Image (cartoon, grey):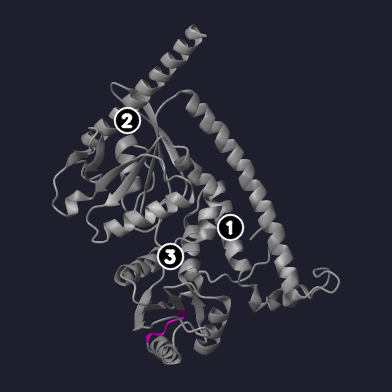
Amino acid sequence: MAGGAPRQSTGRANGAAAGGAVLVALDFGRDDHAESRAELRLLAASAGVRVLAVVEGRRSRPDPALFAGSGKVDEVARVCAEAGATLVIFNHDLSPAQQRNLERRLEHRVIDRTTLILDIFAQRASSHEGKVQVELAQLQHLATRLVRGWTHLERQKGGIGLRGPGETQLETDRRLIGRRVKVLKERLEKLGRQRTVQRRARMRGEVLSVSIVGYTNAGKSTLFNALTRAGAYAADQLFATLDTTTRRLFLPPVGSITLSDTVGFIRGLPHTLVAAFRATLEETVHADLLLHVVDASSPTREAQIDEVNKVLAEIGADAIPQLIVCNKIDLNGVGPGVDRDECGTIARVRMSARTGAGLDDLRQALAEAAAAKTESRRARALADTTDVHVT
C-alpha cells in the first residue's frame, strides 16, 4: 500500500489460492450454520477462489490454540494434501495466535472470514473513496495481527534508517500503520465534507431522498438500474456494488426524487468495514425512506432482514421509515402486488427487478411517499405562517 505503510502479506485470498482452497466450517450449534456455510462458498467464489473441499465438524466452543480441535486440524491437513490446496479458509474469525498456530501446524496460508470479505472489497473498490475506505479497513484489521512480527521489513531495508532508537520491529510496524491510518482517516473526513455539501445542495430542492439497502446479492443494483436506467454494475455475486451511486428519478405527477444504491450487508460484516464505509453509508443515514430489498426466494430471508436491521442500527439509520421490496418473485412463483399498513400506506411491494413485474407498484409507492413529504412540507409552512400572524 502506498504512503509509507509496510507491505505485509494480508492473507489476500486471490494470490494465495492459486492451487485452490479448503474451506473449514465448524458447527457450534447456531441455527444459521447451514446458511453461513453456503455463504462461505459464495464468498470464496466472489473472491475468485477455487474451492477444492469443505471440512465440517461440531464443537461446543472454539479451541483456544487452534480454534478447531487437534484431530480436526489433522483432518484439514490431510484434505489439503489430497486436494493439492494452498489456502485454508475458516468460516469464523480467528485470533492472531490461532491463525499463527494453524499456519505452523498446516504449513499452508490460513485466513478467516473477515480477511476474505476484506479481500473481496479490495478487489471491487473502484472509486477513490472506496479504495481509501477499504485500505483503512484492511490496515485496522491488520493492526490487530501484529503479534506475528514482520521480519521481511528488516530483510528488505536492513533496518537502516527505519527503526527509531530502541524500537523493536513490532513497534516500528505499529508506528508505520498508525501513521498511514491517520492519513487515510483525514482523507476520508475531507471526502465526507464534500459529500455533505453535495447532500445539502440536493436537500435544498426538498425532494424525497431514497436509499436502497438490503442483504448482499438481494438484487439492489438490478432494481436501481430498472428504476433509473443508470447502468450500475449488477451481477449474481456477493458485494457486486461497493460505491454509492445517486440518480434522480422522475415520478409523474409528483416530480423528481433522488435514489441511491449502496453496499450490501451480510452476517458478520467486519466492524472495521462498517466504520470505514460510514461516510458512504451516510447517504442511508440521511435518507427520507429506505427501500429494503429482500430476496423473496431465499429460505433465510427473515434472518437476512434481521442482519440488515442490525447494521442499520449500528450506523444510526434504524429510525428511518422502510419500504420492504420483496424481489425475485419470478423465482418462487409469487405474483406481484402491494401490502398496505393500517394507515393505508404501502408497506411492502412484491416484484421482480429482473422481469419488471411489479415495478409500477413500486413507482406508485415512491410517488405516494414523495407526495406525503410535499404535503408535510406544506403543512409546516402553513403552521409557520400562522405562528407569524398570531405573533
- Seen from the viewer's position, the closer of residues 255 and 356 is 255
Between disc 1 and disc 3, the foreground one is 1
Expressed as whole percent of the image width and height from the top left, the position of residue 122 reads 51, 59
Q: Earlier in the sequence, mark 2 or mark 1?
A: 1
Q: Residue furthest top?
A: 389
SS category of the residue bearing label 2 = helix
Q: Which residue bears the numbered disc 1? A: 135
Q: Which residue bears the numbered disc 3? A: 47
Judge whether residue 35 is colored magenta. no
What stretch of residues is rendered in magenta?
83-87
Would residue 24 appear left or right of 151 to someone viewing this image? left
Between disc 2 and disc 1, the foreground one is 2
CA neighbours of label 2 inside 10 A, class few (<14), some (14 to 19), many (20+): many
Q: Residue at x 20, y 40 (%)?
A: 339
Say what amino acid the circle numbered 3 marks: Ala
Label ID, residue 369: 2
Expressed as whole percent of the image width and height from the top left, the position of residue 282 reads 50, 42
- Seen from the viewer's position, the closer of residues 261 and 65 is 65
Asked whether residue 236 is in view, the answer is no
